[in-house]
Amino acid sequence: MGLMSGKRGVIFGVANDKSIAWGTAQKLHEHGAELAFTYLNEALEKRVRPLAESLGSEIILPCDVTSDEQIEAVFAELEKRWGKIDFVVHSVAFANRDDLKNPFSQTSRDGFRLAMDISAYSLIPMVRYAAPLMSEGGSVVTMTYLGAVRAVPQYNVMGVAKAALESSVRYLAAEFGEKNIRVNAVSAGPIKTLAASGIGDFKKKLHVMEERSPLKRTVTQEEVGNSALYLLSDLASGVTGEVHYVDGGFSIVAG
């Protein structure tokens, strides 16, 4: 019997097999969870569908998280198919490349709005529409990064969006705690993903991680998946509104 046996949930944000969300999905599947997946568009569907099907998923749905209607439609379909759910994984973030590359003070108003909408606000309607399906309680996990609490070079507007995301975690945890719905975040160290490719000097950041962290290495998808698994499982039944760091100890030494 796995930690997630008999539990069902949905994962937002798998882009390919290098995604943090995919590492989380594999761990959840390994421990017995039944999974649903979403994809942004047709191009990403071609990557996501084979991955989802390899884990036995029969629910693979389109969802642009800038649309409340599409988010609501995902949970309406889950209610139709499953009746209830136990967990949600929010692993979605985006910022315009120019707003990451240019000095932070040059962030465009539209770029700021877009980064906040996709990377932070999208968690709110997800929890809003998921909550009625969590009649017996549930758990929500989102993905954040050290740039939410420290100024990381060239992370820029994404760091501000992650700060808003972490604050949203606390407010959502406070609101839904009485319904036994927990909301937490995993702060992963730098990992080579499709999203990370848009961050300037990313390879340099990996090297800094390896040099300065107590573990003298970067973390892996599997390790992030293990942390998400813990927070989504009953092992973390008393944990909510928290940011769980899995970064090789980088947060301890980063200046």
Image (cartoon, helix red, strand yellow):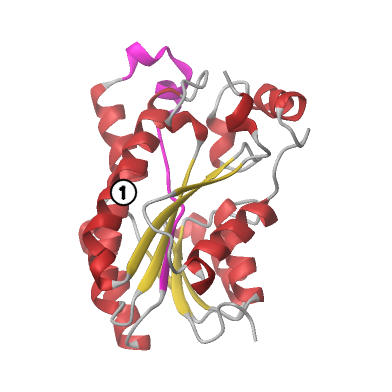
**Which residue type does callout 1 highlight?**
Arg
Residue at the (34%, 13%) spot, across then down = 106
- For residue 179, what is the image quadrant? bottom left
Q: In terms of depth relative to the viewer, which is nearer, 29 or 212?
A: 212
Q: In terms of depth relative to the viewer, which is nearer, 112 or 217?
A: 217
Disc 1: which residue:
170
Looking at the rendering, in which quadrant would you find the N terminus? Answer: bottom right
Residue 46 seen: no
- In the rendered image, residue 42, in percent from the top left (x then y), is placed at 46, 59
Residue 84 vs 89, above or below: the answer is below
Magenta span includes 161 = no
- In the rendered image, residue 143, in percent from the top left (x then y), is placed at 47, 48
Residue at the (24%, 68%) spot, across then down = 178
Residue at the (25%, 33%) spot, across then down = 113
- For residue 71, what is the image quadrant? bottom left
Dot 1: element: helix
Residue 37 seen: yes
- In the rendered image, residue 139, in percent from the top left (x then y), is placed at 40, 67
In the visual, does 175 lie left or right of 103? left
* Segment colored magenta: 87-107
In the visual, does 95 lie left or right of 199? left
Residue at the (59%, 57%) spot, across then down = 227
Residue 1 vs 169, above or below: the answer is below
Crowd rating for badge 1 (residues with CA inside 10 Å; few <14, some 14–19, many 20+): some
Q: In terms of depth relative to the viewer, which is nearer, 5 or 235?
A: 235
